[in-house]
Amino acid sequence: MNKIVIAADSFKGCLSSKEVAESIAAGIRKVYPHCEIACISIADGGEGFCQAVIDNKNGHKIETVVHDPLMRTIPAEYAIIDKQTAIIESAQASGLPLLREEERNPLITSTYGTGELIKDAIAKGCQNIVIGLGGSATNDGGLGMLMALGYRFYDSNGNTILQQGGQALGHIAHIDTTQRIPELAQCTFTIACDVDNPFIGDNGATYVYAPQKGANKDSLEELEKNMRHWCAILFQHTNIDLSTVKGSGAAGGLAGAFIALMDAKTVSGIDYVLHSVDFDKQIVNADLVITGEGKIDRQTLMGKAPQGILKRTHNYAIPTIALVGSITDTLSDLHSGFDGIFPIQAGPISLREAMEHPIARENLTRTIEQLLLFHKGTCHSHKNIKE
């Protein structure tokens, strides 16, 4: 092996993309000490998106205070690169990990804090805003985010709507843009996500994702009804029908608000990151590409980071394997072009133990070391047979 490229997603709640790559690289060096190793931080728009861009683009973090999904003040951060570009993870302010399980309720959870991150970035001179969507605790169609940026909403009686969350959407009769922050007119928005769900419907934001955010059967029906109403209001205001726009349902419809009211461009999160690091150039002459994530399942094949890597490497016929924490579907459903998918656990272990930082790092190092030792031994045997 002369060159190996490592581009793995973070193992959520355990290791960052950079830490995963470092752990794998340590195992490679034990077998091929002189091999060229390229470590690339990646993410698909959710957790780790901001850090991946910072690692690759030498950006710097900005710390601020925003409101979480239940409107409690919390610290949050985003990144600035090239002086005028802000990289924001909506999950920093509106993410599911910010809530205890019993607090999850998309009828009341809000994206207000995401709007505050945008407002802070604009105040610091940023005009290009890139939003990574993923892992949200909300189903408010972006209402809270818009409120934070100065949009005002009124019911059919002319009363100002102050409620947050998906419960408020059904009361909106009018959108007032006169008080939104004026700098928005000079800003461009790019939303990076890994799903193509529309705003409403059986495959929309509510029915697909709201259950994991705490919605029960009754609240699902209310949320979908309210989202349909909000979709109609946005159509009246913008002439954009989000029910037909792929990806507008991302992050509980937050994507739809950006598309309809901010003329946002939608991109694949992993494609955005790979383009920003000239990934195709970095894999030139690579003998192997290693990707992975904490849990691989059918959703991986719908645009998540490992699948994005595979699409690129397939164009150059570069062998590609995935190292993962766990596999939740049958391998026959998942291979889809991978030359191998390898879980890293050495034996029976609890999820809590598996997610301990040193254990995960050791498992990654050991797994790739054993795989490469096997490869090296096989190549040597084949050479002797030919001789």
Image (cartoon, rainbow, N blue to C red):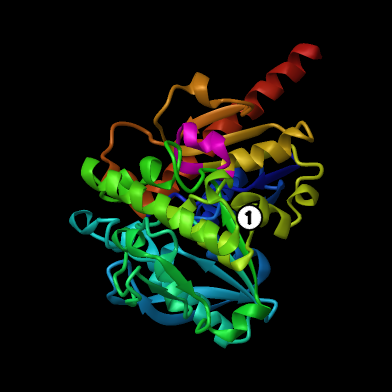
Q: In this view, does 262 lie above or below 329?
A: below
Per the rendered image, the range of residues in magenta is 293-305
Query: Quadrant location of the N terminus?
Result: top right
Viewer-closest of 199 and 225: 225
Viewer-closest of 381 and 69: 69
Q: Residue at x 63, y 62 (%)?
A: 264
**In the rendered structure, does residue 208 fall within the stretch colored magenta?**
no
Q: Would you identify the image quadrant in which residue 187 lies?
A: bottom right
Q: Is residue 323 above or below residue 95?
A: above
Viewer-closest of 211 and 11: 211
Q: Residue at x 35, y 66 (%)?
A: 110
The percent position of residue 177, horizontal first and vertical second, equals 52, 77
Viewer-closest of 98 and 338: 98
Disc 1 designates what residue? Answer: 266
**In the rendered structure, does residue 298 fall within the stretch colored magenta?**
yes
Q: Which residue is drawn at 53% across and 82% down?
A: 178
The percent position of residue 320, horizontal first and vertical second, equals 65, 34
